[in-house]
């Protein structure tokens, strides 16, 4: 299977910190959950993705205000209705590893809210699977 890599970066701001002045784990997990779902949209072409499973989360090192955090997702496997990713987070300035999650399983749902078969076995390299719709104006 070809591997696809999806990388996004976040700047650690005051509102992302815990009471000790380091990056709050909940903030980081929120970013990861959202970005994993976006990565899965690119892979499965379904904008109704939900997180089904997260393996152990290893918070390797802390980050502080002003750090740049790089989250990298790689496609590990395609199931019938799911895609499995792994996640590595590093600190851009120090190059320290910040977090690892070896398994994130996301499932694509249909209009009925049930898992839907996606039919993919190879990773998309770009945005060719992004679902397109007519533009809307409010
Ligand atoms: C996602 C959900 C619809 C799946 O329901 P389900 O009854 O488990 O459905 P299925 O048994 O058909 O499993 C769906 C897929 O999840 C996988 N899966 C189910 N349980 C799993 C587990 N514990 N670990 C890893 N994968 C799992 C299955 O292998 C299957 O993948 P595949 O079709 O690619 O083989 C349901 O569990 C759900 O709605 N969960 C809440 C999701 C959510 O709200 N997430 C947080 C917010 S995004």
Image (cartoon, helix red, strand yellow):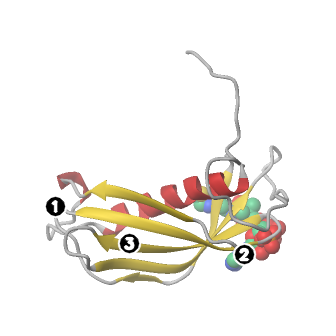
Look at 64% across and 52% down and name the residue there.
Answer: 41
- Which of the two discs, 3 and 2, sits closer to the camera? 2
The quarter of the picture where residue 26 lies is bottom left
Look at 67% across and 44% down and name the residue there.
Answer: 130
Q: Which residue is mark 2?
A: 1
Pointer 3 and pointer 1: residues touching (CB < 8 Å)? no
Quadrant of image for the C terminus: top right
Q: Which residue is mark 1?
A: 65
Horizontal side, residue 77 vs residue 59: left or right: right
Q: Position of residue 92 (x, y in %)?
A: 26, 67
Residue 19, numbered circle? none
Q: Earlier in the sequence, mark 3 or mark 1?
A: 1
Measured Cα–Cα span from mark 3 to mark 1: 16 Å
Q: Position of residue 105 (x, y in %)?
A: 64, 71
Pointer 3 and pointer 2: residues touching (CB < 8 Å)? no
* Label 1, residues with CA under 10 Å away: few <14, some 14-19, many ≥20: some
Residue 89, numbered circle? 3
Q: Is residue 56 above or below residue 132?
A: below
């Amino acid at each position: 299977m070809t591997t696809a890599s999806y990388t996004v970066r976040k700047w650690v701001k005051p509102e992302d910190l815990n009471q000790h002045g380091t990056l709050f784990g909940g903030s980081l997990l929120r970013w990861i959950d959202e970005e994993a779902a976006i990565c899965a949209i690119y892979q499965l072409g379904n904008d109704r993705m939900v997180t089904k499973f997260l393996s152990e989360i290893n918070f390797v090192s802390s980050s502080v205000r002003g750090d740049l955090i790089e989250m990298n997702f790689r496609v590990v496997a395609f199931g019938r209705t799911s895609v499995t990713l792994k996640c590595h987070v590093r600190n851009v300035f120090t190059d320290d590893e910040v977090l690892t999650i070896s398994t994130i399983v996301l499932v694509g749902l249909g209009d009925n809210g049930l898992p839907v078969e996606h039919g993919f076995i190879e990773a998309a390299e770009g945005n060719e699977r992004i679902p397109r719709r007519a533009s809307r104006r409010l």
